[in-house]
Amino acid sequence: MLELIRSADSELDRKPSATGDRLEKQPPKNKIWKTIAKLLFSIVVLYFLFRKCDWQALLFIIKTANVPFVIAAIVAMQIAHVIAAVRWNLLCKKSSFILLLKMVFVSRLYTTILPGQLFGEAAKVFHVKRSSPNLSTQEITTSVIVDKIVGLVGLLLVGIFGVFMSNKLPSGEMAFWFAVCVFALGVCLAIPAIPVVSRLINAILDAIAKHSEKSTKLVSKLRLFLVSWQSYMRTPLVLVATVLIGVVFQAILAASMYYLGCSVSVQVPFADWCWIFAILSVALLLPISFAGLGVRETTLVGFLSIFGVSNELALSISLLALFIQIIDAVIGGVILLLDRSMLKNASLESEAEIATAEP
């Protein structure tokens, strides 16, 4: 959370270059090494997974995949993105739905080409702020973080449904731990709104600011963030609505994976895809790989083996999921290029009007 606030603020405080706004500055050496470590992790994991894979069988499975099911998976993914924008719009009402929908796709671009989902979330803050000067950085950042948390709650609820409906799992124990996670996230959402806790947090921030002048700016931003966070807690109906929309969103994403499974004749029930997808999504949040490569493949191979699915079939589903992710990234890239082109043309038109205007 702090990293997202820092990264968003540092980008918004930076002046745009002559070649246009870029989300990335020159990264420090420690970030370069982290990126290299993530890339190496992905390469090593993929090497061991694909080393024992029958390449001819894998290519045959992909070539003979049922195209209508693949198209259904792609359509389901796009519907999910629209629903994600609707949910975010409930939390960020001052911004337009179309802008937020564009930013959902743009974030997919950054998540795909950069190491870690944090870049995708920071991209949302950066581009929404640039297009909506009436919104503060703290408001946008808080909406992104709350949106992420309620999304996790929805994901875990879908996972609980899958566990209860599964015939392959000891539903009681797994559902209990899913429920514990939902409760913990709910507590994390509500605690800062409790007056006593709020005063305690402010006292801690005061102490930090007194003992470290360098942290004064960050402390002030955290205060504003806390105020924005508490404002959401005063609208429980909005939070309930976003959680329900989040459940629909996650269920559609699970359906997308189900369709990909059907495209290669993997007969795993939808309910089981719900809990598999929930575990996969949580695993992809771990900042240990480059664009989720290696983590997604390992998770699918491991859990689909419970149903007797071969490594080749599991890897084919993973590759098809990566294909859809690349489609989303391309759409995000096109949106970004078109928006920059429109901004540039508008700027040139304004300069021309000023130049031709009479004094």
Image: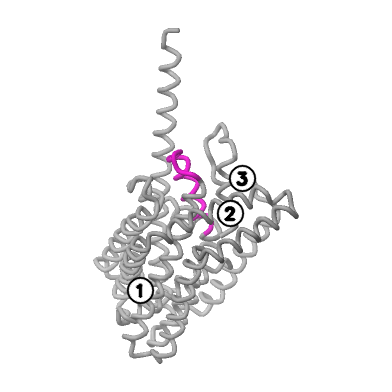
Q: Which residue does the numbered mark 1 point to in the structure image? A: 61
Indicate the quadrant containing the C terminus: top left, top right, bottom left or bottom right: top left
Between disc 3 and disc 1, the foreground one is: 3
1 or 2: tag closer to the N-terminus: 1
> Callout 2: few (<14), some (14-19), or many (20+) C-alpha neighbours within 10 Å?
some
Label 3, label 1: how far apart the Cα atoms are: 42 Å
Pointer 2 with pointer 3, Cβ within 8 A: no
Q: Could you say where residue 71 lies in the image, as x and y percent from the top left?
A: 27, 63
Q: Residue at x 42, y 43 (%)?
A: 336
Q: Which residues are magenta?
A: 118-136
Question: As shown in the figure, which amino acid type bears the numbered disc 3?
Answer: Lys
Q: Residue at x 40, y 23 (%)?
A: 349
Q: Could you say where residue 249 lies in the image, as x and y percent from the top left?
A: 33, 65
Question: As shown in the figure, which amino acid type bears the numbered disc 1?
Answer: Ile
Q: Could you say where residue 55 lies in the image, as x and y percent from the top left?
A: 45, 74
Label 1, label 2: how far apart the Cα atoms are: 51 Å
Instruction: Kindly give the residue lying farthest to the top in the view shown.
Output: 359
Q: Which residue does the numbered mark 2 point to in the structure image? A: 222
What SS does tag 3 mark?
A: loop
Q: Residue at x 53, y 56 (%)?
A: 226
What SS does tag 1 mark?
A: helix
What SS does tag 2 mark?
A: helix
Q: Residue at x 48, y 72 (%)?
A: 187
Q: Which mark is residue 25?
A: 3
Question: As shown in the figure, which amino acid type bears the numbered disc 2?
Answer: Leu
In screen coordinates, is 208 left or right of 296?
right
In the rendered image, the vertical position of residue 217 relative to residue 189, given as above or below: above
Decide which of 174, 94 is in the foreground and name it: 94
* Occupied quadrant, residue 67: bottom left
Q: Which mark is residue 24?
A: none
Between disc 1 and disc 2, the foreground one is: 2
Pointer 3 with pointer 1, Cβ within 8 A: no
